[in-house]
Amino acid sequence: MIKFFGLTKRNLLVFFKNRQSVIFSLMTSIIVFCLYLLFLKGTYTDALDSVVASNEFLKTMVTSNDIDAYANLVMLVGVLGSAMITVPFYCLTTAVRDREFKVDYDIAATPIKRWQIVLSYFVSAALSSILMTGIILTAGLLILKLTGGLCITAKSVASAYGIVALGSVSGTALFMVVVLMFKNTSALGAFFGILSAAAGFVIGAYIPVSQFSESIRTFCNIFPASHITTLIRNALLNDVLAKMDTQIGGYDNGLFVGSIKELFSFKAFMFGKDLEIRHMLVYVCTWLAVSLILMIFVYTKTYKRR
């Protein structure tokens, strides 16, 4: 185990020593944040304002501050959801770089078992991803707190950190299987470009998934990252929605908040059914277990001792 921990430490140091890798792993999240500030926030707030303005009672009960707080948290969910895909993927570049420069030959020649080698790559990437996505969540919450646009309990914050950690681990496990099939960083970079472009649409960072057809919604929710994003959405947004519902005082029997939850996909839709939170957690954990088994199998087939 000492050799395993030593190799894991080495992989961590190699990744964080390359500052460009760290910066580019966050690039998609930065792009989503910029798009939100330039275009998306106005779309969300205008849509909610129009609904509230159409009802004289809602106009007095739901304030513009509540709408801004909700829109800001939607932005944070989109940034985190994108990070759950791009950060774990980019944290695994060390494995491909080692293969490209034949470093894996030296590692495979050591007494370390193959399953320990592949798990060292996985653990180091998962820890890197947890750290970086945790920083994104912390920075987002602090910024919203300082600007007065935050309505969330300590329990919800703790849940959000737990979901982010689960998303980082599950995303790393899934992409580890994919990354092991690449032989050089050029091909990996090209694939990353495609992945980062599609990620925001798949998880609903740009457009709510509920606006798509049922078949497209099912396709998007096949990926564990979509479930993780939905879980984060529940953790971060339920408190501000509960506040709105309390202010309305049951006047509409929860119709306003219910409509928002349906529009912004607080449940994962798959094959004609809406999945509850416990079902989404089971789905993500199942993907995690399967990916761990597959990564060991793929590694033994693609990495040969020389």
Image (cartoon, grey):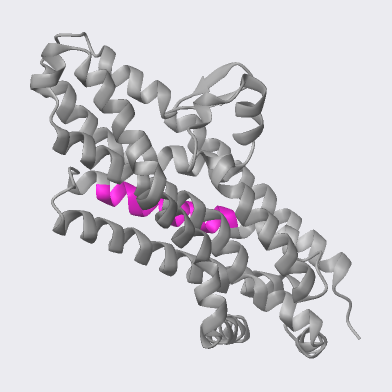
> In the figure, is residue 221 to the left or right of 180?
left
Q: Is residue 264 above or below residue 40?
A: above
Q: Is 167 included in the stretch rendered in magenta? A: yes
Which residue is located at x 14 percent, y 9 percent?
A: 251
Which residue is located at x 22 percent, y 41 percent?
A: 69
> In the figure, is residue 297 to the left or right of 193?
right
Which residues are drawn in magenta?
157-171
> In the figure, is residue 61 to the left or right of 265?
left
Which of the 4 image quadrants contains residue 2? bottom right
Given the current orientation, which residue lies at the most extreme right position? 306
Which residue is located at x 61 percent, y 81 percent?
A: 4
Q: Is residue 228 above or below residue 111?
A: above
Q: Is residue 50 above or below residue 91?
A: above
Which of the 4 image quadrants contains residue 113? bottom right
Q: Nearer the viewer, residue 253 or 39?
A: 39
Task: Provide residue 89's location: percent of width, then percent of height.
Answer: 62, 63
What is the magenta segment's predominant secondary structure?
helix
Task: Provide residue 70's location: percent of width, then percent of height.
Answer: 26, 38
Task: Provide residue 283's location: percent of width, then percent of height.
Answer: 57, 37
Q: Is 91 included in the stretch rendered in magenta? A: no
Residue 292 appears in the picture as rendered: no
Quadrant where the C terminus lies? bottom right
Quadrant where the N terminus lies? bottom right
